[in-house]
Structure formats: C-alpha cells, structure tokens
C-alpha cells in the first residue's frame, strides 16, 4: 500500500504553502498559459505561442490590389524546462521534533519561491530589447516617464504596463517622493512604507533580488557585411521537406571586434538604424536598441552573435511579412559602429506591457503506489508544488523533497525593456 501523510503533516504543508504563494512576487506579474499534461508529454514539453498580429493599412478607396496581401502569424516556443527541488533527510531522532520538520518545510518553500522569482527576474532582465539608459541615480517620475516615452514611440499599448525595480532604485524613487511636502497619502506612503505605486503609466514593484548587468565587453565593434536584414517567416522547410515553425525573435549578425569581448545581455544601438512605430512604420528619430541573446561563433564575440529583436527594415524589395513587422528604418551599412548602452555595472530594472512574459506551469505525476507519500497544491497562478516522502527501513530515516516545474517565455521582446541607472 502507498504511504500516507499524517493530519499534522497535511496542516503544516498547507500553512507553508500559503507563505510560498505570497512569496511569488515577480511570477505573479507574468501571464499564465496552462498546458495539459498529456499534450506536454507528447510534444516534448514545448508549445508554440502566438505573437500579436500587426495590421497594414492603405490609402484610397480602391483597394483591389491589396486583398492579395498575406498576413503572417508569428509564433514563439515555450518549453517547460525550469525545475527546482529541495531534498533532505531526517533521522529517526530528528523526527521526534515536529517543529523541526515544519521549519525545514518553511525553508524549502521559501527557497523555491526565491528560485522562481530569480528565474523570472533574470529572463525579464536578459531578454527585454527596449533599453532606457539613465546617467544618474534613480529619482522618480522623469525616469519612468522615459520608459513611457520609449513604449509610446513604438506604439506599445498604454495600459497594463509593469516596472519592477531593484531595492536600491525603488527606494531612491520613494525617497524623492517622500521628500516632497507630506500633505497627501502618496507622499506619506513613500515616507512610511517606501511605497512608490503607479508612476507615469506603470505599476511599480520592488525586488529583493535584481539581475546586475556588467560593463559591455566589446569596446570597438562594427557591423561586418552589408544588407544584414531579417525576413520574418511563420514556417520553414527542412532538408527532408518537413515544415517547422520559426522563432522570429532573433537574428544572427556578423560583427568585427577590434577589442574586447561581447557578452550575453549587452545592449547596444547601430549607427544609421533607427526604430519605427510598429503600427505607422514612421521613423521615430531614435536609434533602435538591441540586446545580445547569444554568442554564436568567434570565441567570445568576434564573429557572429545572435541579437534580439531582428533587423526588419523592409528597405529592399520587401515581402508582405517585412512590411507587416517592420521595426527599423534601414539595414546597417558595412562598418556601421555599434554603441554600447550598459557602460557601468548596475541592476537591471525590467519593464513590460501586458502578457509579453508568460509562465507555463508543469506538473509531476509520481505514483503513490511506488511507495511514496505525495502531497501537492497549486498556486493561484497555476504553479504546482509537489511534496514527497519516503522512509528507509535500514536506518529508520525519512527522505523529503519539494519540487516545482514550469516554463518561462518572453513572447515579444519589443514589448519588454530594461531601465538602467548610473550609466556613464
């Protein structure tokens, strides 16, 4: 027969699970997509999620020639690949103290909540392609207003915007707000609770952990080769004629590195490449910002790098997908200079709109008939926590483990960004 948990163990699990649910700060801001277990197993734990459509418009009453234009639906893959476990063993003598077991459960849940928050924070910090660089410390409204400006220039919807700040940057903003005349609740909240609240169209949140960017590694880097533009495609054919989805969030470009080493997470602009409004396709007059997603070849940066977003310039006999998803004014010229934005080590403060970030809960299904005692619970967001127990007859000890399993994805890097302070 399967083992079973005692009543006091179930109560203790429920109590620590409530604390775990409260501790999920960043992940609660991510949207949730639920994938059923059977589909997850049959697809290798990977599901393709759609990116937002961008429509085209044309002037004039006669649109006869435009009905033949095609709309391309782009998708991105999400893989349930994040797993964290806290295992421990209690001896027969340690098990005499039930409080000891509950404290270890508290510690396990706290660690798992921290792991999830760190994974979400790192994903947001490393993949957001919109970069707002500030040369001073955080002060408040003007800083967040620049994030608002950056999104507005691109045509990002003006609702449901979120900004998560490192503790020092958040508290600096609260300090600025608290220093004002304390004659309203917002100033009092800033002074008494270090609470900032909504600013310039963004809901703000405080992190106890924030990913830190380092100084950009490449000091002198240029584009190596002209016409490095990207053409979006929903699917592609392999050598055997099989059709596969295409991940259009990235592009591989060739660069020449005179000195230094490029690193993943470095952010930059390219001379002569401006951003365009996603809907109107008009030049905003501002350089397009990119982030290094991977080093492909070159032993640390010299050669080819993967960037996000791709350079979709639609400036040479463009296809319908290029016109639909155009995000740059032009492809970079050969020898165009790259300017790095992360010029000083600092916390990365991610910001995004809507459901750009998504979490896909996974589930373990261990069999109790295999000699395990199993407890599981699901957070409001759908993240499942599994607790298992198994005794050892040899030394009368008992093994416990707590597990979580999930996937994370940035569905649209151009609807996510990074706010950097104290950049030189």
Image (cartoon, rainbow, N blue to C red):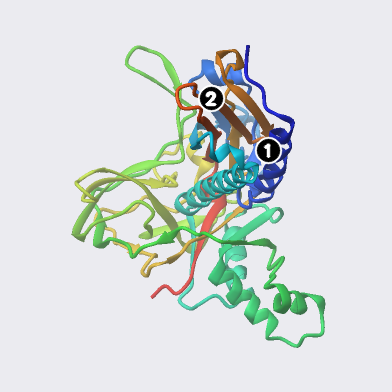
Asked if 242 appears above or below 201 in the picture, the reply is above
Q: Nearer the viewer, residue 390 or 288?
A: 390
Residue 261: give x, y in percent of width and height. Answer: 24, 57
Residue 58 in sight here: no
Spatial separation of the CA atoms under disc 2 and disc 1: 18 Å
Which marked residue is nearer to the observer: mark 2 or mark 1?
Answer: 2
Q: Relative to residue 403, is residue 346 drawn left or right? A: left
- Residue 237: mark in rendering: none
Q: Nearer the viewer, residue 192 or 408?
A: 192
Residue 413 in sight here: yes
Q: Relative to residue 88, is residue 64 drawn left or right? A: right
Q: Which residue is mark 2?
A: 391
Q: Quadrant of the N terminus?
A: top right
Which residue is pictured at 70% across the width and 63% down the height? 201
Residue 124: give x, y in percent of width and height. Answer: 52, 51
Does the residue at mark 2 contact the one at mark 1 (Cβ under 8 Å)? Answer: no
Q: Quadrant of the C terminus?
A: bottom left
Q: Which residue is mark 1?
A: 13
Which quadrant of the view contains residue 191?
A: bottom right
Asked if 224 appears above or below 248 in the picture, the reply is below
Q: Earlier in the sequence, mark 2 or mark 1?
A: 1
Which quadrant of the view contains residue 266?
A: bottom left
Asked if 256 appears above or below 185 in the picture, the reply is above
Which quadrant of the view contains residue 239?
A: top left
Residue 267: give x, y in percent of width and height. Answer: 39, 58
At mark 2, the secondary structure is strand
Which residue is pictured at 53% across the width and 25% down the height? 391
At mark 1, the secondary structure is helix
Count of marks, rendered view: 2
Which residue is pictured at 74% across the width and 37% down the height? 11
Q: Relative to residue 114, is residue 33 drawn left or right? A: right
Q: Residues within 10 Å of mark 1 (few under 14, many from 20)?
A: some
């Amino acid at each position: 027969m399967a083992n079973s948990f005692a009543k006091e163990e179930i109560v203790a699990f429920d109590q620590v699970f409530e604390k775990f649910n409260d501790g999920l700060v960043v992940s609660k801001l991510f949207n949730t997509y639920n994938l059923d277990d059977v589909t997850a197993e049959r697809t290798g734990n990977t599901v393709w999620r759609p990116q937002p459509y961008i429509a085209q418009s044309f002037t004039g009453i006669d649109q006869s020639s435009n009905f033949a234009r095609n709309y391309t639906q782009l998708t991105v893959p999400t893989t349930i690949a994040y797993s964290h476990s806290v295992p421990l063993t209690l001896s027969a003598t340690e098990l005499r103290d039930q409080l000891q077991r509950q404290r270890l459960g508290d510690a396990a849940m706290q660690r798992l909540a921290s792991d999830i928050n760190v994974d979400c924070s790192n994903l947001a910090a490393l993949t957001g392609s919109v970069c707002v660089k500030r040369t001073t410390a955080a002060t408040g409204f003007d800083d967040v207003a620049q994030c608002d400006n950056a999104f507005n220039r691109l045509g990002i919807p003006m609702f449901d915007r979120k900004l998560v700040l490192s503790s020092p940057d958040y508290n600096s903003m609260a300090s600025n707000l608290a220093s004002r005349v304390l004659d309203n609740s917002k100033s009092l909240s800033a002074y008494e609770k270090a609470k900032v609240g909504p600013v310039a169209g963004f809901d703000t949140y405080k992190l106890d952990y924030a990913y830190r960017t380092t100084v950009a590694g490449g000091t002198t880097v240029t584009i190596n080769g002209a016409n490095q533009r990207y053409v979006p495609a929903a699917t592609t054919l392999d050598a055997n004629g099989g059709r596969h989805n295409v991940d259009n969030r990235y592009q591989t470009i060739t660069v020449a590195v005179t000195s230094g080493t490029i690193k993943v997470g470095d952010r930059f602009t390219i001379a002569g490449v401006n951003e365009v409004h996603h809907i109107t396709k008009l030049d905003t007059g501002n350089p397009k910002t990119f982030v290094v997603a991977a080093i492909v070849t070159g032993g640390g940066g010299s050669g080819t790098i993967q960037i996000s977003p791709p350079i979709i310039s639609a400036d040479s006999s463009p296809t319908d997908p290029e016109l639909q998803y155009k995000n740059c004014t032009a492809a970079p010229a050969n020898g165009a200079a790259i300017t790095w934005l992360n010029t000083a080590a600092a916390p990365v403060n991610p910001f995004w709109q809507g459901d750009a970030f998504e979490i896909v809960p996974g589930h373990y299904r261990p069999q109790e008939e295999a000699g395990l005692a199993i407890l599981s619970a699901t957070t409001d967001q759908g993240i499942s926590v599994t607790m298992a127990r198994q005794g050892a007859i040899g030394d009368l000890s008992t093994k416990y483990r707590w597990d979580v399993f999930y996937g994370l994805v940035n569905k649209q890097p151009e609807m996510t960004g990074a706010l950097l302070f104290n950049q030189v």
